[in-house]
Each structure stands twice: as C-alpha cells, then as structure tokens.
Amino acid sequence: MFSKLPGGPWRFLLLPFSLLYWLGIGIRNWLYDRHILKSSAFGLPLVCVGNLAAGGTGKSPMVEYLVDKLRTKFRVATLSRGYKRKTQGYALANPSTTALEIGDEPMQFHLKFPGIPVAVGESRLEAIPQLLHDRPETEIIILDDAFQHRSIRAGLNILLTEREQLFTRDFFLPVGTLRDQKKSARRAQLIIVTKCDPGMDQQEKEIVVRELSPARGQAVFFTTLDYGQLFHIIHRDQAVLNSGVNVLLVTGIANPIPLQRFITNASGRVDTMHYSDHHLYTIDDLREIKSRFEKLEGDHKIIISTEKDAVRLYKFQSELENLPVYIIPVRHRFLFNEEEKFLGIVCDFAEKKPINDQVK
C-alpha cells in the first residue's frame, strides 16, 4: 500500500507516528461520539465542505460553486480558518483586507464575491456568533474545511475525496494524507468524488461507489474540473492557450498534477515551478520566476498560475505589470447529469426542509 502513497515506500519508517496520530484521532472521535465532548448547533443552516485528507480535493472551488449557486436565493456567508494568515482570532473581510490578514483562500472568495461576507477564525464555535452579530441578515453559512471540527454540528456535511486517491486507499499522516478516520465519512450526507476523468463511464462510477460503500441515506456524486478563460493577473486581458504557446506553470497548491496535465495537453512546451501549498511568495521568488521565464524558449510564451496563487502575488503589482502572468480559473462540473439533484438537496436544506428523503 505504501508504494501507492505520495513519497514512496520509504514512508513505512514513519509508521509509528501514523499510529500515534490514529490513536489520538480515535480517542477524540470516541469522546464526541459518546457526547463526552459536546457539539454545538446553531439556529440557521450550516453547510460544511471538507475532506478526510490533507488538502488537494478541491474544497475551495466547491465553496465557490456553492456561493455562486446559493447567493441568488439566500444571504450566504463563508467561514474559514484562515490558514497561514499573519493575524489571529476572528476577522471579517472588508475593502482594505489583504491575504496576509485572512489567508489566501478566504481572500480568493472575497475578491470573487465582493458582496458576500467572508469571515475567518480558528475557533468556528466562537466565530459563528461574531459573524452573525456583524451580519445578522445571514441566512446560511458555508464552513470551509471544517469536517474535523466537531465542536460545531453542521446540518449538511459535504465530504470530498479525489478520484485518484480515494480516502479508502489512504493512510494516516504522515505515512499517508488522512487526518481523520475513514469511518468518519459516515457523518457526511453527501460524498463528492472530485477530479474525475470527464469521460468517466457508468461502470467506473459503480465500481467507485462500491469501494466507498456509502451508508444508507448517503448520496455519492462525481465531478470533474473545468478550466476557464485565462486572464492577466493585473490588466484582466484574456489570452488563448494553444499548441503554439510555451508555458511556465507556477503553483503553490496541494496537488498541481491535474492542472499540469491540462496545460500540457493544451500548450506547446510546459516548464513547472511548484511551491508548497499556501506558499507566501517573496521578491526572491519573483526574481527566480522571471529568470526561469526568460530562459523559456520560443517567441510566444506566458506564465500561468492559479487564482489561489494570484492573491499571494498581487503585492508585486508593479513588477507584474509588464509580465505575461495569466491566471486560470477552475470550477467543478457534475457528471452523469446529477447537478440538479445535488443542488436540490442543498437548497432544500437551506430552506430548512427535511433532506432525508432527498439523499438516496
């Protein structure tokens, strides 16, 4: 099994640490399951988007998808931890907010949906009342990456798992990427298998569903990633990607492989610079990016990065003004014509209708 996990077979050396991690998570879940540790509910719909693994399943695009679909019917807000921000405690985004204050993913939500309240806080239990105090008109809150935070009891849990590394095949950190027990998946009402091949057929779908072995009442959906129109990071001018364009792909995300595969298939030559997830770019990084770009062959060449990286690169606006740095947006697209069913479940929940009869 270890040979199928990131890092290769040497990771078996870390097995004792994984066993300690498993023990700690198991004890914690046991305490919550027996109500020794308490979970709190709130008087409005809470939608939790999360996973069992450490990053890379497409949580941020799913939060964006939900905000986009729900904002025309409900007063939506998002609440995240604010990972790797330089501040602490609760914060609500405002027109002068930066990524350093709230984190890159919340900043991405704030820029894309300027009319939607975007809040951060390490303790969701404390942050939700503060958010409702600041925005009392809020009708539904989307909790970003909060599946493990059992101090909050969300009414609708959406669990994401990546097609090429289903949680059923994973192992606990640091040997694998699991940060929760596999059986915790049963707390979710909806499971979404992400980053599927767009040509996935019914037979493969059924094989995956059997492997996931959903509990009674759980619904399993499948999505693929759709990449949108390239736009310049500063000017917002659009660009077309084709076989005549050479690309320097710069990313600081958990799993750049699907994007790299897409760029490789759509362009001429691709050079890559992969930084760690949530990487905070420095001026030295920018100089290195410029140097690598200048060495890239061809007359038609550009730099491509992600929306998540863009919020960490904006601080270099003057340096990026004359560089061909383009951002590629990404969104989930549901397979097997099941988007309407998915949205029906979510909207029924937001309207406080029973969802048990819908989730089948």
Image: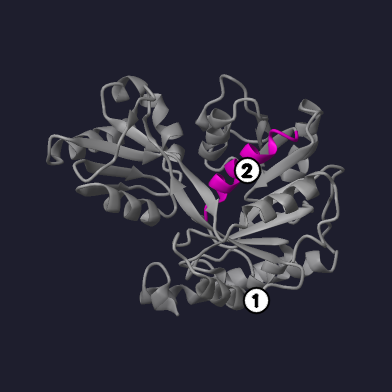
Q: Residue at x 42, y 40 (%)?
A: 228
Which image quarter: residue 179?
Answer: bottom right
Q: Residue furthest bottom?
A: 1
The picture places residue 124, in percent across and down from the top left corner, at: 72, 44
Give the labeled residue for mark 2: 81
Amino acid type at circle 1 is Ser
- Among numbered discs 2 and 1, the one appearing first in the sequence: 2
Label 1 SS: loop
Q: Of the residues tagged 2 and 1, which is closer to the observer?
A: 1
Q: Residue at x 32, y 39 (%)?
A: 304
Q: Which residues are magenta?
A: 57-74
Which image quarter: residue 97?
Answer: top right
Give the labeled residue for mark 1: 213
Amino acid type at circle 2 is Arg
Who is closer to the viewer here, 73 or 193?
A: 73
Total marks placed: 2
Label 2 SS: loop
Who is closer to the viewer here, 328 or 308?
A: 328
The picture places residue 292, in percent across and down from the top left corner, at: 19, 40
Residue 65 in the magenta stretch? The answer is yes
Which image quarter: residue 102?
Answer: top right
The picture places residue 282, in percent across and down from the top left corner, at: 35, 34
Residue 343 in the magenta stretch? The answer is no
Q: Mark 2 and 1 residues: CB-CB less than 8 Å, in contact?
A: no
Using a 10 Å C-alpha cutoff, classify the residue at mark 2 as few (fewer than 14 neighbours), some (14 to 19) or many (20 or more). many
- Relative height, residue 74 to residue 15 (above, below): above
